[in-house]
Amino acid sequence: MKKHWWKESVIYQIYPRSFMDSNGDGIGDIPGIITKLDYLKELGVDVIWLSPVYKSPNDDNGYDISDYRDIMDDLGTMADWELLLKEMHDRGMKLIMDLVVNHSSDEHQWFVESRKSKDNPYRDYYIWRPGKNGKEPNNWESVFSGSSWQYDETTDEYYLHIFSKKQPDLNWENPKLRQEIYDMMQFWLDKGIDGFRMDVINFISKVDGLPDAPNPEGKPYASGSQFFMNGPKIHDYLQEMSREVLDRYNAMTVGEMPGANVELAKLYTDEDRNEVNMIFQFEHVDLDSGPGGKWDLRPLKLTDLKKSFTKWQMGLEEIGWNSLYLNNHDQPRMVSRFGDDKEFRVESAKMLGTFLHMLKGTPYIYQGEEIGMTNVRFDSIDEYKDIETLNMYNEKVKQNGEDPEKVMESIYVKGRDNARTPFQWDNSEHGGFTTGTPWLQVNPNYKEINASQAVKDDNSIYHYYRKLIQLRKEHQIIVHGSYDILVPEDENIYVYTRTLESQKLLVLLNFTNEEQSFDVPADLQGKKNEILISNYEASAGYGSAIPLRPYEAIVYLIQN
Ligand code: NOJ
């Protein structure tokens, strides 16, 4: 396998609206980020992925872009952004930008033109269809509830929007649109950025004819994902994008790809095919959803998690590359979901960090993960801001009369605002995020959980993450070693090894709040070993069984 800088890196995701407010308007901004670059440098991350900062009416917090070449007023100016890039590069950090090109905002000039008339030169930048029997052109449900189609009176047609009605899908069939996107990507690469995170990039090719989705239950709308995910021209478009733009730069790309399985991931990330470097896949974050989708809660089985990670680790062993994440701005907080955010918050956050950072692939840290920020429970739906959550609540409670308490429970577990509460910098009002009124309330636990406390405490999650990041730089085995799982059927502990030449890593993880024990296989006994990292006091050397305290994580480096 070839070596690349993005294989050796740890990436930190910033959700700008919630990171740091510099001007007291309650919204995080670019000058705020600049004031925190030293904190991130200290943590040791190499790359920052910035969620969208482009001009946007903020229907979906910047994932609805009205001008791809300018900065959102709430967040600062182009001069601020240029300074951010310079300050990052001066510190030896790289910047990757979010590329949101499955859809734009309905306030983008292209769409303003497109909706004017059927013969407008921008008409085919979007996906317009006449209605069918007085209804929408097909029965696809929007990811954000309701139909995927919006009727537009001016031309008596509907436009497609897989997400909100203010996020019309761009028409990638149109070569002129594709060229516009490539030119725009070049604009940012020429400014010196180091790559792109590509939003739902496997949605850009849709199946010809946009057929109705199967709907055995006769619901008003049904999931058409099989017709708009991984569509027939997706590989052509990605390869064209590489040829037209990316090949000229030493840039990295990560494609967000819901609905991609390992076989597809191999196609997307095979270096010889020149599509993207790695993808964000969703299998492991769908394991705690029932047949009704993300809000249909079901308990997670550790064996399912192990099966899934093992499939991806082994599947992309020779061809392709994994991205590693347990949370981001769309997912609940990692420690609340996979660990214990109360009694063993610190231990379990460190254990989950160990789990992820010792796997093969590029780890992503989502802001606040490094201090163990948790999910939030606001009393009323009125405190929530996320369009996905609010649309779902309206549909279920107001339209379908479902029990509001049950729906709130699902929001507490899965809602995206869990990840979007402002960063907790210190124990002053609003966690030091703003001197004004935050756009989304700060999690009330900021008095105990905050960065200032974490930096001061040598035993904090923050310092543990510093060490995890540092270890990757010191040990090639963490980057390149091959993965194997031990005790795959155990419901309580996750044990895996990484192997490179004569070295082995033995990674032991207790996923429960009780003591467990691991029976060491004969071939791993009696070897010279040292502890690379552990979240309790532990000493090198082990016998035929290794006891594990609640949420304990230990990594042994073994010499053969
Ligand atoms: C995925 C993004 O991560 C999410 O935040 C957004 O709502 C959708 N794509 C639509 O852009």
Image: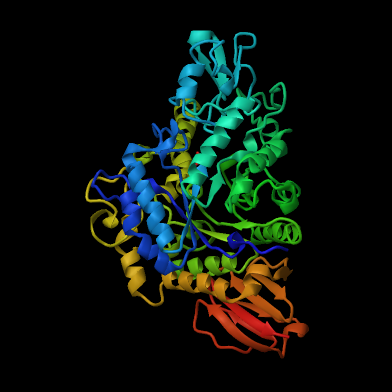
Q: How many marks?
A: 0
- Residue at the (49%, 25%) spot, across then down: 165
Residue 51 visible in rendering: yes
Residue 249 location (% of width, % of height): 58, 50
Q: Nearer the viewer, residue 347 or 401?
A: 347
Residue 203 location (% of width, % of height): 63, 35
Q: Is residue 472 above or below residue 234?
A: below
Locate the N terminus by quadrant: bottom right
Locate the C terminus by quadrant: bottom right
The quadrant holding residue 75 is: top left
- Residue at the (50%, 69%) spot, across then down: 350
The quadrant holding residue 312 is: bottom right
The quadrant holding residue 552 is: bottom right
Residue 289 visible in rendering: no
Residue 183 location (% of width, % of height): 54, 35
Is 420 placed left or right of 330 in the picture? left
Q: Is residue 438 above or below residue 335?
A: above
Residue 524 location (% of width, % of height): 73, 83
Is 187 placed left or right of 376 in the picture? right
The figure's colour scheme reads: rainbow
Q: Is residue 397 above or below residue 510?
A: above
- Residue at the (27%, 62%) spot, across then down: 427
